[in-house]
Amino acid sequence: MATSGGGGAALCGALLDYKTEKFALTRNRRMGLLYRLLQLAVLGYVLGWVFVVRRGYQDTDAAPHVSVVTKLKGVSVSRAEDARRRLWDAADFSRPPQVGEAGFEPVSQRRSGSPSVLDGICVEDVDCPMGNPVVHGNGIKTGKCVMFNSTHSTCEIFGWCPVENDTLPRKPLLAEAENFTLFIKNTVNFTKFNFSKGNTLQTNDPTYFKTCMYDPFFSPSCPVFRIRDMVEAAGETFGALALLGGSISVRIEWDCDLDQPAAHCQPRYSFILLDRRYNFRTASYYWDSQQQHYRSLLKLYGIRFDISVHGQAGKFGIIPAAVSFGTGIAFLGTATMICDLVLLYLDAKADFYWKEKFEEVRMGCGTTWES
Ligand SMILES: Nc1ncnc2c1ncn2[C@@H]1O[C@H](COP(=O)(O)OP(=O)(O)OP(=O)(O)O)[C@@H](O)[C@H]1O
């Protein structure tokens, strides 16, 4: 053994040292079993979950550009309270993006003065300050208190008259709407991979979309949906929703593995009931032969479909594959760590293993290693 030969030589010696790990082998069967089980669990997680389910070897694009076009079809006849029949077809009941079909309350109105209905009960003219709007928005007070019926008077308003009376429909006027069909044309574009796909089948049969009907099992690639089927898939019955309207979310989900043929990239549809009441007003305007301005007001109780598209596409990429593989290998180290903890702290012979694993080396000062 050489004695101290200077700081430089010692540093040089330390740089050229090679340290190797020392392994302690124990024939503890329980420990061996635990180790293999942990390795198996980690391997299952890495291969099964990270690689197969999450496709961790792929580069992903989760922000596709999407386009959605809808078209509603169906014909129905409604009977208003005055027994007049009215025919409704696609041009009448579809209000993009809403689908108003359950009922209507037509009022033919003229802009003039009339008694207000809901508020503005008065005794004399001073109770009706001129120019004040009526709270529910039917018109502006003219300053006059007029007879409404035999029991009370209300402020006269300048507005569309007669004012709407707020009665609720008693039955859906377009009950046949349950068989109307909604065509949803959706295209997604994953720009990262320059890949585009639509939900409509590429077919030369011109009658295909006219005759097919979406069914999750028998016809999942037909983008034509019956209204009743969508309402039922959302957990509601058409009859219950048609009377006062409602709102349904149609969720289209794309999960495309671009390492597979493009035909495997298909959307999945799901339907969720968002709201139980939905209505809106719409009016058409005209002048009569005396040049009076009229409007036909419709209050439509309908089913509104909110369509949202979500998607992600993945394709093999060397960087994500290397990262996932490296993470998996590193994860295998946890099996050793857990077994060490059990052996050194929980095992009955923990003291013995502790002594065998850690060797205490004592050395005097100024000693150097032999070169
Ligand atoms: N709501 C629907 N129910 C059933 N079939 C539909 C519906 N909407 C569209 N289609 C059919 O799907 C096909 C493609 O529709 P697209 O709107 O692209 O073509 P179109 O010729 O303009 O349709 P159309 O003139 O019949 O409304 C057409 O055959 C069309 O008749």
Image: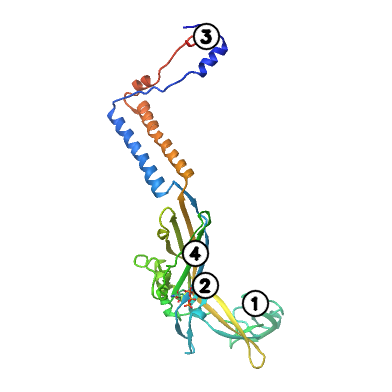
Residue 54 to residue 174: above or below: above
- Asked if labels 1 and 4 touch by Cβ distance under 8 angstroms, the answer is no
Identified at 50% across, 10% down, the residue is 368
Say which of 276 and 261 sits in front: 261
- Residue 58, percent across and down? 45, 48
Q: Which mark is residue 328?
A: none
- Residue 19, percent across and down? 45, 21
Residue 359 to residue 61: above or below: above
Callout 3: SS: loop
Q: Which residue is mark 4?
A: 187
Cα distance between the residues tagged 2 and 3: 89 Å
Left or right: residue 108 compared with residue 370? right
For marks 4 and 1 on the same chain, the one whose residue lies earlier in the sequence: 1
Please state which amino acid type lies under the numbered disc 1: Val
Q: Which mark is residue 98?
A: 2
Q: Which residue is mark 1?
A: 134
Cα distance between the residues tagged 4 and 1: 47 Å
Cα distance between the residues tagged 4 and 3: 77 Å
Please state which amino acid type lies under the numbered disc 4: Thr
Please state which amino acid type lies under the numbered disc 2: Gln
Callout 4: SS: strand
Callout 2: SS: strand
Please state which amino acid type lies under the numbered disc 3: Gly
